[in-house]
Image (spheres, rainbow, N blue to C red):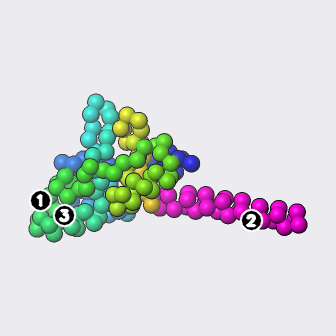
Amino acid sequence: MNVAQICTREVLLIKAGQPLVEAARLMQQRRVGGLVVIEEHAGSVRPVGMLTDRDIICGQFAHQADLHCLTVAEVMAAPAATVTENQSLEEAIAVLRARGVRRAPVINGSGELVGIVTLDDLLPAVAGELDALAQLIGAQASHEHAAD
């Protein structure tokens, strides 16, 4: 199984220059904990960072400024920890673990944004693979007992 099979294709986006209050409002309205920060070049959308609810709170305190006075770029995590759509789940987990994050934009071979993968996407997929492995072990044990 690879990332393309489990990632979410509908991604909430924001540009780095937008006011932080707009990002906070969007996250509240859509009930999400993070946005992919993008740049657009010649019709191509590329992730340049991630913005989480935690980034907003910590950034506001660090800058001692109102949300209306800050931009997304001032508090976002950059560069974004990205995974490619053809990476395995194990490789995606390694990227998230290395960066200490719960979500990452998914890019294609050209670096264009195609989705997002989160811990919530990975857990059921990995659990399914572990279940299949447990069933294999159980089947082997049953087969061995039948042979005795």
Among the two numbered marks 3 and 1 on one chain, the one whose residue lies closer to the N terminus? 3
Extreme residue in the top direction: 42
Q: Residue at x 39, y 42 (%)?
A: 107
**Label 1: how many residues lie within 10 Å, few (<14), some (14-19) or many (20+)?**
few
Nearest to the eye among marks 2 and 3: give it: 2
Q: CA distance from mark 2 to mark 1?
A: 60 Å
Q: Is residue 77 magenta?
A: no
Q: Tag 2: residue type?
A: Gly
Among the two numbered marks 2 and 1 on one chain, the one whose residue lies closer to the N terminus? 1
Nearest to the eye among marks 2 and 1: give it: 2
Q: Which residue is mark 1?
A: 69
Q: Is residue 136 magenta?
A: yes
Is residue 88 in view from this perspective? yes
Among the two numbered marks 2 and 3 on one chain, the one whose residue lies closer to the N terminus? 3
User: Residue 119: horizontal and vertical position, in percent?
Assistant: 45, 60
Q: Which residue is mark 2?
A: 138
Instruction: Determine whether label 3 and label 1 are within 8 Å by CB.
Output: no
Is residue 25 in view from this perspective? no
**In-image side of 56 versus 98 (left or right):** left
| Residue span colored magenta | 120-148
Q: Residue at x 39, y 60 (%)?
A: 97
